[in-house]
Image: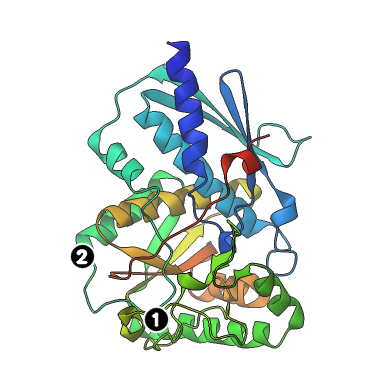
Amino acid sequence: MAIRSVKHALDAAVDAARWAPSVHNTQPWTFSISENEISLRADTDRKLRVEDASGRELLISCGAALYTMRTVMSCEGFEPVVRVLPDPDRPSLLATLQPGAETQADESIKALSGEIERRRTHRAGFADVPVPDKLIDRLVSAAADEGAKLTPVRSDAAVNVIAALTQAAQGVQAQDQRFSLEVIRWARPPGSGRSDGVPAEGYPREAARTEPHFPQRDYAWGHDWGSQTNQGASTATGVAALLTTRGDSRQDWIDAGQALQHVLLHASAYGVSAAFHTQALEMELLREFMRQELCSGEYPQMIMRLGVTFDEKGSMRRPLSEIIW
């Protein structure tokens, strides 16, 4: 095993991990490279104290970063050797990753790697273009590969219930100053030089309502922010889907994040994007209701809509100097 190629693989994995999705683009992670091992740690200063008091969304975000590193490590020619939550005495140490035996990445892994920087979160309706059933089936398999379950919601009545729960949670949170201030903390005005949070260009100025209506966060908080594109006229809901796990431990949350990123990268390779709706999952009563009534007893970790968008958006990530320790 060439020392130089190992170093390149480690560096490439961390560089790619920056592009993983995270709640409000908080990027709540740090990395360190020691000899031939990457350590992934939770950056608890970036935890959402109100929306995510348990740290569930933080660990899902970090799980997405972990899957990204695994993908790149494979593309660099090494079998990724991962230990999740390796030290109970260091709860912020979420995982370690080492390059194992040399391997040859197949075309599917290479395709996923190619989507890491292209994948974007969508925050509006989708174009009226169907998502093929065969692709949805493959996304279900991708989640299962990581120990989670992705369920496309085919019943109109169930989609209406999920939309209503999202509306209810958004309405309650909008009246709670604590929630509003937390969203404001991660909203970036036009021209901001920050490399985290949600930029004003990341959502439409006037998003058309989907039917049923899935409300988005109010990142503009009263300002005339947001992009002006034709995409604002897109009203298709897309395919609603629930990502669930059998348990609800820290391990399950990290697994959910890995499953989420696997699903997102595969979807992106076929021109499909995701819009996330976590409001109802941030209110324990509503999350428990969903678990019992809509998720067959499994724990809901993410609500999303999958669809096609022709709106090209940029993205931003913190430089390596801020996340490597």
- The residue beneath circle 1 is 228
Q: Amino acid at mark 1?
A: Gln
* Residue occupying the point 59% across, 60% down: 193
Q: Give the crowd class for mark 1: few <14, some 14-19, many >=20 residues within 10 Å.
A: few
| Quarter residue 150 falls in | bottom left
Q: Nearer the viewer, residue 50 or 85?
A: 50
In percent of width and height, residue 74 lies at 38, 30
Q: Secondary structure at mark 2?
A: loop
Q: Is residue 83 above or below residue 278?
A: above
Q: Where, quadrant-wise, is the C terminus in this rendering?
A: top right
Q: Is residue 222 above or below residue 192?
A: below
Q: Is residue 97 above or below residue 162?
A: above
Q: Amino acid at mark 2?
A: Pro
In three-dimensional space, the C-alpha distance between marks 2 and 1, rounded to whole angstroms, equals 29 Å
Of pointers 2 and 1, the one earlier in the residue sequence: 2
Q: Nearer the viewer, residue 4 or 74?
A: 4
Q: Give the crowd class for mark 2: few <14, some 14-19, many >=20 residues within 10 Å.
A: few
| 144 relative to 270 in the view: left or right | right
**Disc number for residue 132:** 2
In percent of width and height, residue 212 lies at 40, 88
Whether residue 30 is visible here, answered yes or no, is no
